[in-house]
Amino acid sequence: MATTDSEEANEELRTQLEEDENISSGFTASQREVLLALLNKHEVKNIYSTNQIVTQQRSHPHQELDALEHLQTWQITSLPPREKAIGYKWVFKLKHNPDGSIERHKARLVAKDDVVLVGNDLVKIDSIKALLNACFKIKDIGDLKFFLGIEVARSKQGVALYQRKYALDLLREAGFEDCKPISNPMDYNVKLTKDVGSSLPDNAEYRKLIGKLLYLTNTRPNISFAVRKLSQFLDKPTDLHLRAAHRILRYIKSVPAKGLFFPSQSDLHVTGFSDSDWAACPDSRRSITAYCFYIGSSIVS
C-alpha cells in the first residue's frame, strides 16, 4: 500500500473540498466547515493513497457526518478568546475479513464501538436494533462472523468459535510462522520456578507474548494451564520461561484453527471435573487446582 505525506494529503483534500464541486457538493455547509477545520489543524492518518480517499472513500465521511448531525453531536460556534480548540483525528482505514480481504472502507471522526446482540428471539433482537438505530443511527452488518479476533462459523450441526487469524498473526509476529509444530503445549516433566534460568535483559517481549496468549485462551482452554503457569513469572521472567512460552507457540502451530464447538442438539446436563496437586507449587508451596464444566458436550468454564 502506498502512503502519502500527511501535510501534502491534508492540503490536497482541503483544496478538493474547497474547489471541487463533485466532492464538496456531497457535504452540507456545516460538514465542510468541520472537515476544513480538522484538516487545517490535524493530520490524516492511515492514508493509503489520495486517489483512494477521493474515490473509494468519498461517501464515507459524508455518511459519518450525516450520522453525527442527525444525533446533534455538535453546534458550530466561535471559539472564545484565549481558548484552544480540542483536537480530533479524522481517520481513514480499511476493515478486513478474517481471510485478509477488504470488508469495507471506514472513515471515523470519533471513536465508536461494535455491538453484538445475542438471543433466541429474532423479533426482540430486531426491535432492539430498531431502537438503537433511532437513537444512534447504527449500521447492521448481519450475522456475527468476526469480532475482536474471534471467528464464528455456523452450520446445521452447531456454532464454532475459534481464533485462527489471531493465532496465525501471533505466530508471525513472534517469528514462529515456520516453526516445527509439537503435540502438547507444555513439558510436564520440567518444574518451572521463579529462580530457574537467566533473567531476560528486557521483559517486554515476554509480557507481550503472555498477554496475547492469555487472550487466545478464550477459545483454547487446552493451553490455559500452561499460559497461566507462565503468567506467574511476569515480574522477572527468565530465558527458560520464554522457552516454555515458545513451546506453546509451536503447539499452536500444529492446530491454529482449534477452538470451541457448541452443537445445535445437546442436553442441558451439567458435568464438572476438578483436580488438585497438594502443595505442588515450588515457590509458594500452595496447592494447584484446576476445573472444567460442561453443559452437554460443550465446555463452558
Image (spheres, grey):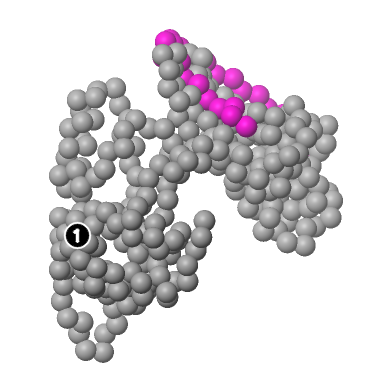
Horizontal relation, residue 38 to residue 278: left or right:
left
Q: Which residue is at a point 60% across and 44% down the rendered structure image?
A: 169
Residue 275 painted magenta? yes
Residue 88 painted magenta? no
Q: Which residue is at a point 28% across and 78% down the rendered structure image?
A: 85
Decide which of 246, 28 is in the foreground and name it.
28
Quick check: can you spot residue 73?
A: no
Residue 40, percent from left and from top: 32, 77
Residue 147, percent from left and from top: 43, 39
Number of labelled discs?
Answer: 1
Residue stretch rendered in magenta on the structure: 256-282
Decide which of 180, 4 is in the foreground and name it.
4
Q: Amino acid at mark 1?
A: Gly
Figure quadrant of residue 267:
top left
Q: Which residue is at a point 29% across and 69% down the rendered structure image?
A: 16
Residue 7, percent from left and from top: 42, 75
Element type where label 1 sits in the image: loop
Horizontal relation, residue 197 to residue 179: left or right:
right
Residue holding disc 1: 26
Residue 193, percent from left and from top: 78, 45
Horizontal relation, residue 247 to residue 218: left or right:
right
Instruction: From this view, report whether residue 236 is shown above or below residue 95.
Output: below
Figure quadrant of residue 26:
bottom left
Decide which of 3, 227 is in the foreground and name it.
3
